[in-house]
Amino acid sequence: MADLKPVRQRHAAALALWRWRAPVRAFEMDADWGVDPHVLESLFRVAAEPPGERSNRAYGQAFAELCKAPIFESEVDPDTVQLFQLEIFGGLWAFGDLLDKSGLDEAERVVELSSGLAGYLDGLVEGSFYSHPSEEAHHQYLADLADRTSGEGYFASRNFAVESACHGTLRTFRDSDGLLDSSAGRELLALCEDFGEEFVATLRWLRTTGHQRSRREPGGGPGLGGRCVWAPHPCVRMYARRGLR
């Protein structure tokens, strides 16, 4: 990703978030969290808008509004779907940090969140007592990749393929091309959204069948076994207070 222009790095980060937009929209959030779904949706939309002071300010204002929700002053013991939703909140914060600092490290943090969540989902599928309804198709996909998967599961491999396709197309963008205002950009958003629907189907299957929680955390760190308590990072609260200038 280092060879992408800064504006394209921002687009790559927005596309990484867009892959998880469908799971956020598909499952109703706990009413006690107090999250306004319209504010949440506006963050995804603004992230895909052309970069500039106006969109940066709009993103900061929307995120500050999101962080007024009680969940950002709480600790919760989430189920699987909720854990993904909470991790995506962290991705939205990381994107705001990218707008504030505009560096490769900040962009990669958002992109790596997507790959980490995809790998975590693979762990949940592998740890289930039930066979995934698309198990044969997933195995065939991995078999077709031969030695290009490095032992990764289906979702991690698919995420990498989608990520690579996005970055490859971004390298061909004209300076005037954006994600929402160009046909190439909208095709990339559609590609990410289609993949996001696969996440939705699998999360819905996991919620229906029940499963054994993976001991691998979404970010790749040590798992917590049976119980996982989520609390907002202090930087999230700080960002909510100051917004983007």
Image: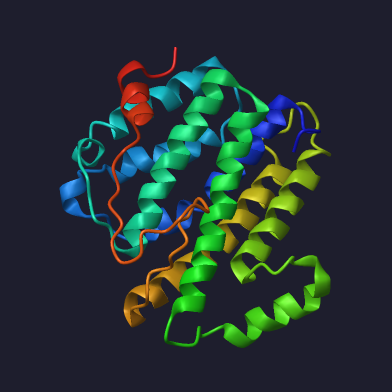
Q: In this view, does 174 lie above or below 76?
A: above
Quick check: 187 left or right of 71?
right
Residue 104 in the image: x percent, y percent?
A: 67, 29
Question: Nearest the camera: 151 or 179?
Answer: 151
Q: Does residue 53 appear in this view?
A: yes
Query: Residue 25, image x and y in percent?
Result: 39, 55
Residue 229 sits above or below residue 89 on the image:
below
Asked if 152 appears above or below 181 in the picture, the reply is: below
Res 196 seen here? no
Residue 135 higher or lower than 104, as above or below: below
The front one of 48 and 88 is: 88
Q: Which residue is drawn at 31% across and 27% down?
A: 237
**Spot occupied by residue 53 in the image (x, y as percentages of width and height):** 54, 15
The quarter of the image holding the C terminus is top left
Q: Residue at 58% across / 62% down in the picture? A: 194
- Residue 87: x and y in percent read 41, 48
In screen coordinates, is 73 left or right of 177?
A: left
Q: In which quarter of the image is the N terminus?
A: top right
Could you tell me which residue is drawn at 65 percent across and 57 percent down?
191
Which residue: 58% across, 84% down? 135
